[in-house]
Amino acid sequence: TDLTTDVLVVGAGGAGLAAAIEASDAGKEVIVIEKMPMAGGNTLRATGGLNAAGTSSQEALDIEDDASIHYEDTMTGGHELNDPELVEILTSQAAPAVEWLIELGADLSDVGRLGGSSNNRTHRPTGGAPVGGHLVQVLQEASQERGVEILLNTTAIELLMEDEAVNGVLVEAENGETYSIFADAVILATGGFGANATMIADLDEGLEGFGTTNHPGATGEGITMAQEIGAALVDMVEIQTHPTVVPEIGYMITEAVRGNGAILINRSGERFVDEMGTRDVVSTATLEQEGQTGFLFFDEEVRESLSAIEGYIERDLVIEAESLEALAEKMEMDIDVLQATVDSYNEAVASGSDEAFGRSDMPVSLESPSFYVIEVGPAVHHTMGGLHISANAEVLNENGEAIPGLFAAGEITGGIHGGNRLGGNALTDLMVFGRIAGQSAAQ
Ligand code: ADP
């Protein structure tokens, strides 16, 4: 049987849950539908953190930062292709989003740094624990407390219209039956299309055959559904690869491993890139190495600084040796080359200047045994393009006019990250624009 609600959210990832909470707090009845058997989407896989400048967590760690620097980093990282108005909102609303999450019960007290950021502003739980699962849990609990209904195994297949306005969604239930959910406002938060290999290769043939870090539900039909009723798309060809993914199994190693001090070396034991460069730069440099992969290299101090690494060791993704010599032997590398690489990196750490590759943030020298490597290469990670939205998260048509009743937030949207998304800016995007979509839909 058909259902009716005030606000219908499609997709129970980070953006959808944030939107649901805000719409509910604005006094609306909210239903969330999710096609998978569980909530979380790609958000569940986010391990890096959430970028924000000027937060209480930074203040507690004596980190001075400003949203305007976050803005500059985001525009530079995105090759200035980003929509400046949306980036202004992203970066100025990031700190309020962090405080909102903390109020909902999130732990975002650890602040590290990911590639392309000029300051420590990537927020994550204590000990550098993976952030996505934590935030999804906090948001799901907050939704439940508010009586938001989350219907799992329920797939949106078509947007319903009346008088040029969206007034609901045709959905398919687990048993294959279809029914309608009518709503005053619909928020599309179905994520990106990183797991849709056909769509990826059609847009960028260079990515044909690439693996992906995405969850299997990231297939992009939310974008197609909106396009069918006249929504405009932006930046669809801008597809990001993540440079440190374990080949074959597609398991992503968080950028925080580099942020906390790891370097990248090739099969010969040489560094080949500024490890803290943006994802596009590091991915391209890796593909130029023999075997088209590289190796994250770090020591005991880095291991102890980041609890995520324990998970990689448990999964058997890490090669470990008690000395550099033993590591070189295991890796069939020339010990003299590896030793020279490590020595010259440690000299760069000591002098504060990396003449070889210009890495600016070198938190620790790599000298405490044991030593570790993880083999990594690029895989499809984030689709920067998507629905064109306004500052209020309204979905726009080709003439730049809002389609009445339709809002969107999260990876389904385009324009915010331009040509390359900075690590840590996805969660910011989901929270900032998810909240805005929820507030706008409630008006
Ligand atoms: P974001 O947080 O950026 O919106 P996520 O990937 O975290 O992205 O969340 C998107 C969610 O939307 C996923 O859980 C995904 O399974 C869900 N989803 C995708 N397509 C549909 C659809 N057609 N109907 C319902 N849910 C969908």
Image (spheres, grey):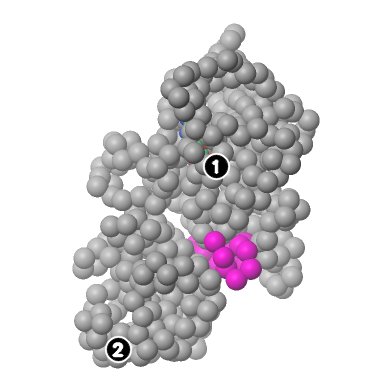
Q: Nearer the viewer, mark 1 or mark 2?
A: 1
Q: Hey, which quadrant is residue 401 in on the image? A: top right
Quadrant where the image shows the N terminus: top right
Quote the CA–CA distance across marks 1 and 2. 44 Å
For residue 43, above or below residue 409: below
Residue 232 is tagged as none
Start-end of magenta stretch: 111-130
Task: Indicate the position of residue 44 as horizontal and vertical percent values.
Answer: 52, 50
Quadrant where the image shows the C terminus: top right
**Mark 2: C-beta under 8 Å from nearest atom of ligand 1:** no
Which residue does the numbered mark 1 point to in the structure image? 39
Give the class, few, some or many, for how many residues have Cα within 10 Å of label 1's Cα (few <14, many ≥20).
many
Q: Which residue shows up at 24% across the image and 86% down it?
A: 329
Q: Main secondary structure of the magenta part?
A: loop
Residue 122 in the magenta stretch? The answer is yes
As helix, strand or loop, the secondary structure at mark 1 comes to loop
User: Is 361 positioned to the left or the right of 390 in the image?
Assistant: left
For residue 153, above or below residue 315: above
User: Is 126 positioned to the left or the right of 205 in the image?
Assistant: right
Which residue does the numbered mark 2 point to in the structure image? 326
Q: Which residue shows up at 36% across the image and 70% down it?
A: 316
The amino acid pointed to by label 1 is Ala
Q: Determine if residue 254 is in view.
A: yes
Which residue is more in the foreground, 79 or 324?
324
Q: Which residue shows up at 40% across the image and 42% down it?
A: 216
Task: Indicate the position of residue 375 as horizontal and vertical percent values.
Answer: 32, 69
Residue 201 in the magenta stretch? The answer is no
For residue 326, above or below residue 127: below
Upstream in sequence: badge 1 or badge 2? 1
**Mark 1: C-beta under 8 Å from nearest atom of ligand 1:** yes
Task: Indicate the position of residue 90 as horizontal and vertical percent values.
Answer: 62, 47
Which residue is more in the foreground, 15 or 127?
127
